[in-house]
Amino acid sequence: MKYLSTGEFARLCGTRKDTLLFYDKEGLLKPRIVSENGYRRYYIGQFYEFDMVTMLKETGSSLKEIRAFMQEPDPAGLLTHLEGKKRLLHRERMRMAARQKMLEATIAFGHEALNARYDVLDLVEMSEERLEMTPVSEEDQTTEEGSIEIFAEFVEKFEKQGRPVPMPLGFMTEKQKISSRVYLADYFFCGASRETSRENMSIRPAGLYARLYHKGAPQSHAEAYSRMVDAIKQRGWVINGHMYGYDMASYIVSANPLEYVAKYCVSVCATGDEAQGPGHAQDRA
C-alpha cells in the first residue's frame, strides 16, 4: 500500500492541508496512520473517501450527515439522502430562476419609468399578459395605511411559499367602476406562475390601450386617474376593458420615498387616425 504525507495527499486531492486537518478533527476523513510523533499518513486509496466528502458537501449536507455516512456506510440510506437533496436542489433552482425573472422585470420597469413621458395620455398596442389576481375589499382601502397593510399580506403569501412575488405588480379596477373615477382596486395582481391556481388566473387581453404614466405623492394618483378617465371620454374613445395600474419600481427610480411611480392602462376602442396605433393622440392628461 502506498501512503502519502498530509501535504502529498492534499496535492493529490487538490485541496489544502488545513482542510484535511479540519476533516480529521471533525471525524470526516482520518489518516490511516498517525505515528507517535504526530505524523499523519494517508493511504492513496482514501482519495475516493475525500471525493465522497466533497460530493456530500456540494449537495448541501451538514457535517453531522457527512460524518454519519463516512463512519457507518449505508448505501440505501445514502441514496435516499441524495434523492432528498436532489429535490431540494430542484426547488432552489426554481427559486433562483424566479428571482432572476423578478430582477430582469424590475430592471425593465426601471428603464421604462426613467424614459417615460409623465401625465401624457397615449395609445399603445399591448400583448396578452397572464396575471394572478387576489381580490381586495373597498373597506380595506379607506386609508393609505390600510392599503399598505393588505398589500403586505399579499406579498407575505409568497414569502411563506419561499418565492419572490412574480412581476409585474399592481392593481386592477373592473370596467363597470372606471366611470365613477373612484381610485380603488378590486384586485391586486402579480405575474402568473406555475403555482397560480386556476381560480386566481386572469388574462389581460392583447389590444389597444390608453396609457398614462404618473409620478407623485400617493394622493396625486387619484387625481391623475380621474383626469385620465376624463381625457379618454373627451377623445371619444370607448372603454371596453378593465383598468390596470402597474407599479413601476418606485423605490428604484425615485429618490423621494414618498413619491409613487405608476403606469395606468385601460383597453379602449378608438376610431379614425387615433386607432392606427402607437404614436397617435399623445396629449397631456
Image (tube, rainbow, N blue to C red):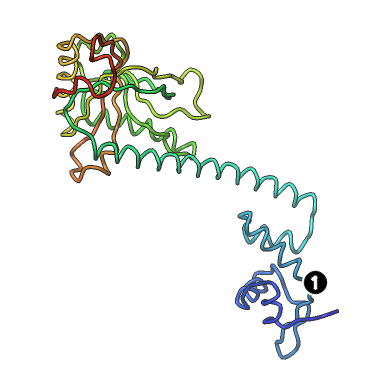
- Res 159 quadrant in image: top left
Q: Please tell me which residue lies in front, 101 or 48.
A: 101
Residue 3 position by quadrant: bottom right
Q: Give the percent coordinates (x, y) of residue 181.
A: 19, 15
Residue at the extreme bottom of the image, as rendered: 37
Q: Position of residue 189 (x, y in %)?
A: 37, 26
Q: Residue at 49% of width from left, 26% of height from top?
A: 196
Q: With respect to residue 108, does 272 lie above or below?
A: above
Residue type indicated by callout 1: Gly
The relative height of residue 15 versus residue 152 in the rendered view (above or below) is: below
**Dot 1, crowdedness within 10 Å: few (<14), some or many (≥20)?**
few
Q: Nearer the viewer, residue 64 or 30?
A: 30
Which quarter of the rendering shows the N terminus? Answer: bottom right
- Out of 285 and 65, give the one closest to the viewer: 285
Q: Is residue 28 positioned above or below 186 on the image? A: below
In this figure, which residue is indicated by the disc labeled 1? 45
**Residue at position x 18%, y 31% in the image:** 118
Residue 88 percent coordinates (x, y): 60, 45
Residue 66 screen position, x and y as percent: 68, 60
- Judge from the rendering whether residue 72 lies leftward or rightward of residue 242; answer left or right: right
